[in-house]
Image: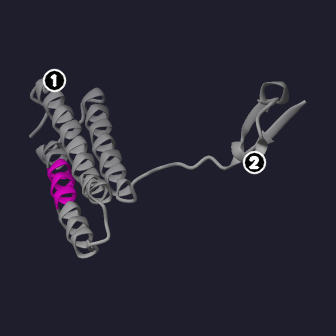
Amino acid sequence: MLLRFRRVVLPLRLLSGIEFDKLLQVKVIMHPDIVLFVILLILVFGIAVRIIYFRATKKPIGYKWIESIKFLGLISLTLGILLQMIELSTALEHITNDLTTEEIAKGLRSTLYSTIHGLLVYSIAMVVLVILKLTDRGETR
């Protein structure tokens, strides 16, 4: 007998001894700003695939496509720092005397996530840019 739940097929014998309520209440912890960085990362990889396709079909590639990867990386880095400043200012507004230092540290640590995500997208974009520039055989104009 199989349990079908949102395209996941699990044999019931593997689920014996597991409470189904706890199984279905799985929480995904994700920072809300990560969606912006995922979109920017998808754009970076989309442009890289387009450049690779143009090189494979020997079509001319404009230099603007390669530079747009650098631009998207810089946008993600700038957006990460800007979002950190916004989150930091809202966190500092909510600090009162009844908060412990542990709670304040958790709040300040959570403001770093957007900067880390921006740096990751920027780093990936720069690696993709370097790879595309090293494999350039003079097709860009």
Query: Image point 18% across, 48% down: which residue?
Result: 73
Q: Nearer the viewer, residue 6 or 62?
A: 6
- Labelled pair 1, 2 in contact (Cβ < 8 Å): no
Residue ID at (24%, 41%): 120
The quarter of the image holding the C terminus is: top left
Amino acid type, residue under disc 1 in the picture? Thr
- Say which label, 1 or 2, has the lower sequence index: 2
- The image quadrant of residue 89 is bottom left
Which region is colored magenta?
Answer: 71-81
Classify mark 1: helix, strand or loop: loop
Residue 47 appears in the rendering: yes
The reply, left or right, for residue 30 in relation to residue 114 is right
- Is residue 60 visible to the viewer in this orientation of the structure? no
- 85 w.r.t. 102: above or below: below
Quadrant housing residue 107: bottom left
The residue identified by callout 2 is 21
Viewer-nearest residue: 94 or 128: 94
Q: Is residue 84 magenta?
A: no
Q: Position of residue 13 (x, y in %)?
A: 84, 25
The residue beneath circle 1 is 135
Residue furthest right in the image? 1
Image quarter where the N terminus lies is: top right
Q: Is residue 78 magenta?
A: yes
- Cα gap from disc 1 to disc 2, whole angstroms: 53 Å
